[in-house]
Amino acid sequence: MTPHGTTTNTRPTASENYRHLLARGFRSAEAANLAAFMGGLPIGDQPWTIDAVSKILFLRELHRSSAFGPDDGEPRRLPTRTWPT
């Protein structure tokens, strides 16, 4: 716990893993693929980008924490406006 009563996340983020791998001499595509693998994402023929990895892991965490609302992703309707007569 921090002094403010919140817990700290000791697990490095995908971006932190990516930067660490770059500093160790990995190429960008290799580092992004390894960051994806460490985040539990499947590795295929097409290399990952760190932006895509970060976005997918963010959305996964929103889903796990039930932060999505029941109407998220639905088209938004403009409110009906009535004019005085």
Image (spheres, helix red, strand yellow):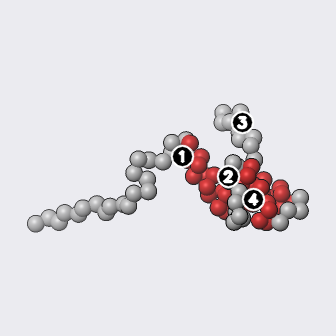
Q: Which quarter of the figure has residue 29?
A: bottom right
Disc number placed over residue 41 in the picture, else none: 2
Report whether residue 60 is seen: yes
- Between residues 8 and 46, which one lies in front from this camera angle? 46
User: At label 4, which amino acid type do we have?
Assistant: Asn
Give the SS element for disc 3: loop
Q: Is residue 8 left or right of residue 82?
A: right
Along the viewing direction, whichever of 23 and 43 lies nearer the viewer: 43
Label 1's element?
A: helix
Q: Are marks 3 and 2 in contact (CB under 8 Å)?
A: no
Given the image, on which type of amino acid does mark 1 rest?
Answer: His
Q: Which residue is mark 1?
A: 63
Mark 3 crowd level (few <14, some 14–19, many ≥20, 10 Å Cα): few
- Can the viewer see residue 13 in this picture? no
What is the C-alpha distance between the residues marked 3 and 2?
Answer: 30 Å
CA distance for labels 3 and 1 = 26 Å
Compute the Cα span from label 1 to label 2: 15 Å
Q: Closer to the observer: label 3 or label 1?
A: 1
**Depicted 39 relative to depicted 55: above or below:** above
Q: Earlier along the polypeptide chain: callout 3 or callout 4? A: 3
| Label 4 sits on residue | 33
Quarter holding the C terminus is bottom left
